[in-house]
Image (cartoon, rainbow, N blue to C red):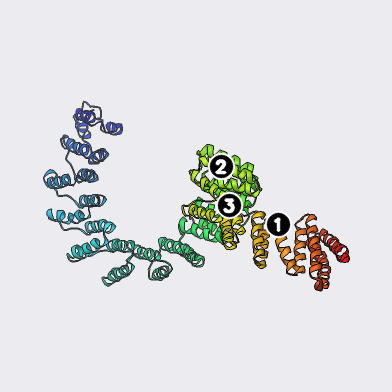
């Protein structure tokens, strides 16, 4: 190797072995031609020196490398090596040194700086946010007896637009237009970008008209920039953007991507699909983002098979479909209860080389829990860990909530233990722990729920302290104080557990605040905690006490429709109220419902006693009572035969007979 190379490498210690080998001299031949060839081959190229300069880790080392190369035999710097050094100096904001280099260039290499060097300086000033200094580059260009090119002006304009649109407009007006520099589509595209970024849409339209008045046909980029700005202003702007597209000579994929995404943001599925069809007809395939948004909207409306069709058409036309689109499909199938199709598309995406991620499994687990297929949900959880996909908080939270909602509290506790072991807790999020309390609450294991709440104190001291205060106030019948602590907890972003909601609802009903209690039960449901029958019962009872029988009946129907099995306490207040009002038909119809929910015969003994009282109190309406009993006996047989429950007729018959024979005959 030549001595000067070895010396330089020892001096800097920063050049790679790759370049050491590249610069190694060829073996010396005895012939003079070989000797001459060897001498020439030892001179590095401008490309090699430029690369060495840009590889240095400081501006001083870059300058040292540049000066070292100047002393190499038969080597002269060029525009490219000066540009490499100037780029490095700009990176470290050494702009005074840059000016010195510009001044020495005519003497050193026999030519002034070229356009590429001025562009490098402008970009460097832009990165340094020295926008006013960027404008002064025009003076540097003139200093070397050159007229600024359009490319230089556009570069300055681009820097100004990113920092100050007003400064950019002034530069365009005073430095470009007045100097006779005619802008091109790129110039106006830069200005349009600045105007739209600052939401000056009306000025954007003026700029469009200025282009046309100067005989410049706006290109697709200019139109797309303005359309994008319009779409960000809302529904009206999207409509104007759609109209603007009709002016374009050649809308492209970007045009459709912008408009489809905008319509999807407004949840306007019809217009999104219309534009998708139009893009297909013109031979365009929107990119994965707008396509995924359409799929998400369709799946959200339950139109999952249409979403599948769109993805198939996109793939047939060479478009790409990513894991987010497949996740949307899987979520859609799970929401309509077709988890088997969700599994199918999981296998389909794997077959096509699109690997599932944690969100894919989260969607499947959520769908399986919603469908009450808890064993399959646990199986998917185990599969994802075996496949090397680490569960995230959402995975654990979803699975624990699902298991506890399905009365699988043991499995929920196991997953919680695993979460604490793998993730060292929940990251300060209380929802998985509240799900465990909800599981105990659903099984009416309230003592265990309170014990678990106490154990949570080490993780969530503030939440547990407030929860216990609320429970204590409710126990002491200090409902106003309990509600104050609850409101403070909510205001600070806290999430009460199911037992807190339940105790508060009971307390509010005891003091007759049915409206507040009803709002709380709605909040409870919004947080995913569906009340058990005892919580509903206290509301039904209070509605009946206040004479709001219709509201009580609706609440009873709601709890049945949502899968909550009513008990004696659910029906007793309503039957009692109907009987006191003389509505025996309504009371006995509820009795029939009770029988259909397999309530015990013992409850009817209360109604037997109630019948005796009613017979004595409503003597003038005895015949009406008898008529209702016989009518309901016939209704029971008919309704029971429809539902395939023959026991209902027998039960009513026996019960009716007991009332008719024993109490009525004795009076």
Instruction: Check the image and name the residue furthest to the top.
Output: 30
Using the image as rendered, state which of residue 397 and residue 305 is in the foreground: 397
| Picture coordinates of residue 219, whole percent (x, y) | 33, 65
Badge 2 density bin: few <14, some 14–19, many ≥20, Cα 10 Å? some
Q: Secondary structure at mark 2?
A: helix
Residue tagged 3: 474
| Picture coordinates of residue 233, whole percent (x, y) | 39, 66
Measure the alpha-carbon separation of dots 3 and 2: 17 Å
Residue tagged 1: 569
Residue found at x 15% / y 53%: 140
Which quadrant holds residue 162? Answer: bottom left
Q: Earlier in the sequence, mark 1 or mark 2?
A: 2
What label does residue 604 carry, if any? Answer: none
Which quadrant holds residue 107? Answer: top left
Q: Earlier in the sequence, mark 3 or mark 1?
A: 3
Question: Which label lies toward us, 3 or 1?
Answer: 3
Using the image as rendered, state which of residue 592 and residue 165 is in the foreground: 592
Badge 1 density bin: few <14, some 14–19, many ≥20, Cα 10 Å? some
Tell me whether the residue at label 3 lies in contact with that at label 2, contact meaning CB atoms closer than 8 angstroms.
no
Residue found at x 17% / y 46%: 98
Decide if residue 405 is on the left or right side of residue 54.
right
Measure the alpha-carbon separation of dots 3 and 1: 21 Å
Measure the alpha-carbon separation of dots 1 and 2: 30 Å
Q: Is residue 276 visible?
A: yes
Compared with residue 412, is residue 319 higher up or lower down, i.e. above or below?
A: below
Tell me whether the residue at label 1 lies in contact with that at label 2, contact meaning CB atoms closer than 8 angstroms.
no
Q: Secondary structure at mark 1?
A: helix
| Picture coordinates of residue 329, whole percent (x, y) | 56, 55
Residue tagged 2: 454
| Picture coordinates of residue 608, whole percent (x, y) | 81, 61
């Amino acid at each position: 190797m030549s001595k000067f190379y070895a010396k330089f490498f020892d001096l800097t210690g920063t050049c790679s072995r790759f370049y050491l080998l590249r610069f190694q001299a060829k073996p010396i031949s005895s012939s003079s031609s070989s000797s001459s060839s060897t001498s020439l081959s030892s001179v590095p190229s401008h490309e090699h020196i430029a690369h060495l300069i840009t590889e240095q880790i400081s501006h001083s080392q870059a300058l040292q490398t540049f000066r070292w190369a100047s002393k190499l035999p038969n080597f002269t710097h060029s525009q490219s090596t000066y540009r490499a050094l100037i780029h490095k100096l700009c990176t470290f904001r050494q702009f005074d040194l840059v000016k010195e280099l510009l001044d020495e260039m005519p003497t050193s290499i026999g030519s002034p700086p070229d356009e590429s060097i001025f562009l490098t300086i402008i970009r460097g000033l832009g990165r340094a946010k020295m926008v006013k200094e960027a404008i002064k580059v025009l003076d540097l260009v003139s200093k070397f007896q050159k007229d600024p090119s359009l490319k230089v002006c556009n570069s300055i304009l681009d820097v100004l637009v990113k920092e100050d649109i007003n400064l950019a407009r002034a530069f365009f007006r005073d430095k470009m237009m007045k100097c006779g520099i005619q802008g091109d589509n790129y110039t106006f595209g830069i200005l349009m970008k600045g105007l739209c970024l600052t939401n000056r849409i009306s000025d954007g339209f003026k700029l469009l008209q200025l282009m046309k008045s100067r005989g410049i046909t706006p290109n697709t980029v200019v139109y797309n920039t303005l359309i994008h700005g319009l779409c960000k202003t809302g529904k009206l702007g999207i409509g104007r953007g759609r109209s603007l597209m009709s002016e374009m000579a050649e809308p492209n994929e970007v045009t459709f991507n912008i408009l489809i995404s905008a319509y999807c943001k407004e949840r306007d599925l019809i217009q999104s699909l219309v534009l998708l069809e139009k893009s297909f007809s013109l031979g365009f395939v929107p990119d994965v983002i707008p396509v995924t948004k359409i799929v998400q909207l369709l799946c959200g409306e339950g139109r999952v098979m249409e979403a599948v069709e769109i993805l198939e058409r996109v793939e047939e036309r060479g478009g790409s479909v990513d894991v987010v689109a497949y996740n949307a499909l899987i979520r859609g199938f799970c929401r309509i209860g077709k988890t088997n199709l969700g599994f199918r598309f999981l296998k389909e995406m794997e077959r096509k080389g699109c690997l599932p991620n944690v969100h894919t499994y989260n969607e499947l687990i959520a769908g399986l829990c919603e469908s009450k297929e808890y064993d399959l949900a646990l199986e998917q959880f185990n599969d994802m860990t075996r496949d090397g996909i680490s569960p995230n908080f959402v995975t654990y939270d979803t699975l624990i909530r699902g298991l506890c909602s399905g009365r699988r509290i043991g499995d929920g506790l196991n997953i919680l233990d695993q979460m604490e072991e793998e993730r060292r807790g929940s990251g300060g999020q209380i929802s998985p722990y509240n799900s465990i309390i909800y599981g105990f609450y659903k099984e009416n294991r309230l003592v265990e729920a309170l014990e678990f709440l106490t154990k949570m104190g080490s993780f969530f001291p503030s939440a547990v302290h407030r929860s216990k205060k609320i429970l204590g106030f409710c126990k002491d019948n200090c409902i106003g104080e309990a509600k104050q602590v609850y409101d403070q907890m909510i205001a600070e972003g806290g999430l009460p557990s199911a037992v807190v909601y339940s105790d508060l609802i009971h307390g509010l009903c005891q003091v007759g605040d049915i409206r507040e209690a009803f709002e709380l039960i709605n909040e409870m449901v919004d947080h995913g905690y569906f009340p058990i029958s005892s919580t509903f019962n206290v509301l039904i009872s209070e509605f009946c006490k206040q004479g709001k029988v219709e509201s009580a009946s609706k609440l009873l129907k709601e709890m049945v429709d949502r899968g909550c099995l009513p008990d004696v306490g659910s029906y007793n207040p309503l039957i009692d109220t109907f009987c006191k009002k003389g509505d025996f038909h309504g009371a006995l119809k509820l009795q029939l419902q009770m029988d259909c929910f397999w309530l015990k015969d013992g409850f009817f003994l209360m109604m037997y006693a109630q019948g005796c009282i009613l017979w004595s109190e409503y003597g003038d309406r005895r015949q009406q009572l008898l008529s209702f009993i016989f009518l309901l006996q016939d209704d029971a047989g008919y309704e029971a035969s429809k539902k395939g429950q023959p026991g209902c007729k027998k039960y009513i018959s026996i019960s009716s007979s007991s009332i008719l024979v024993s109490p009525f005959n004795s009076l």
